[in-house]
Amino acid sequence: MRDEAKSIARGLQRRDPNLLDRLIEQYQYRLFRYLVYITGNKERAEDFFQETWIRVLERGYQYDGRSRFEAWLFAIARHLVIDWQRAKKTQSLDALTDPEQEHPLQVANENEPSPLHQVLSQEKEENVQASLEKIPAIYREVLVLRFQEELQIDEMAGVLSIPVSTVKSRLYRGLEALRGALPGGAA
Amino acid sequence: MKAELHIRAHQFIAKERVEGLAQAERDSLAAHLQECALCAEFARQTEQALRSLRTAAIPLPSGLASRTQFRVRLRAQELREREPHRRALWLACAVSWACGIFSAPYVWRLFEWFGQLTRMPKLVWELGFGLWWTIPVLFAAVVLLMENARHSDEADWMRQGS
C-alpha cells in the first residue's frame, strides 16, 4: 500500500499522463459518488469531478505518498466544493450543512424531488436511497467516507480538516440518523 | 434487566462500527445480545442500515472518465508549454540578482555621485538605491500575478455554473 502511494506520488510529481489516466479510471466511481453525496447534484458533481482531476494534475507535487491517495483526492474534492460554496454563499460547507444551522445544504423546493433524490431514484432501491436523502449532508458525508470508502478515522479527520473527536461524534450521530432514516431501521 | 445495560449495549453497538471495541467490551456485548432480544434486534437493524448504505449505487455518467482524461491531458499540455516561460523568468531574475550583487558597489557610487550632483538629501538617494534592488522582484511579481489572474479566469466557469 505504502509502495503504491509512493509510486503514485512520484508519477504525480512528473505529471505522468498515463498514471493520471489510470487513476481517473480507477477512482471514478468512488470520487463521483462522494461528490454526489456532498453536492447533492449530479451535474455539479460532474463539474467538480473534472475540476478535481485538474487540481490533482496541477498540485500533484504536494502529494507525498505518506497517506492513502484516496484520502488526499477526497480532500481536494471537498476543498473545491467548499471554495465554490464560499464564493456562492460566502459561507462554509459546514455552516451550510450543519443541521443545527439555519440553512441546510439542500435548498430545493420541498414539493419537488431534490437533485440528489433524482439521481438516487434512478436505481431500484428507491426506499433506501430516498431515506439516505433524509440524513443531513454533514452526517451523510462522514458515513460515506467511513462505510463506503472505508477510510480510517484519522484519514477522515485529514479530509474534513476537523479533529478526530469531531469525526467520531459526527459518525455516532450519523449512524443514529441512518438507523432512523432507513425503512425498518428505526429502533 | 436494568435500563443502563441496554443503553450501554446500544453504545457498544455503535462503537463497534465506528471505532471498534476492546475484547472485554466485545465479550460483554455478545453476552448481552444473547440474553436480550430487543438489543439483538437493534444490532441487526444497525447492520442492515449500514449494508443498505454500502450497497446504495449511483449511476456513473457515461464517458465521464474519458471526458476528464481529455481535459486533464489538455491542461497538462498547457502547463508543459508554460514551463519554459516560467523557467526563463526565474533565470532572468537570478541573473539580475547576481548582476545586482556584483555591481552593487558601483551602483552605490553612481547613486552617491548623482545625489551630490543634484544636492539631494542622503536619505533620498539611499532610498533610490534600495528601490533599484527591488526592480527584479517587482517585475517577477507582476508577471506571476498576471499568470495567476489568467489562471483564475479559466476557473471562473465553476463559479458561474448553476
Image: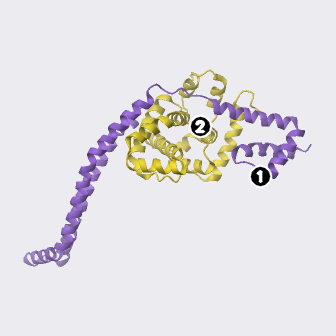
What residue is rendered at 46% in x and 25% in y?
B62
Q: Amino acid at mark 1?
A: Ala
- In the picture shown, does residue B67 fall above or below A3? above
Residue A86 left/right relative to A187: left
Residue B114 shows in this picture? yes
Q: Amino acid at mark 2?
A: Ala
Residue picked out by circle 1: B22
Residue A89, position as x, y percentages in the image: 47, 40
Chain coloured yellow in the rendered structure? A
The chain ID associated with circle 2 is A
Residue picked out by circle 2: A137
Can marks 1 and 2 be said to lie on one chain?
no
Chain coloured purple in the rendered structure? B
Residue B23, position as x, y percentages in the image: 79, 51
| Quadrant of res A47 | top left
As measured in the structure, the alpha-carbon distance from the residue carrying label 1 to the one carrying label 2 is 30 Å
What residue is rendered at 70% in x and 48% in y?
B19
Q: Residues within 10 Å of mark 1 (few under 14, many from 20)?
A: few
Residue B108, position as x, y percentages in the image: 16, 76
Q: Nearer the viewer, residue B52 or A130?
A: B52
What residue is rendered at 25% in x and 50% in y?
B84
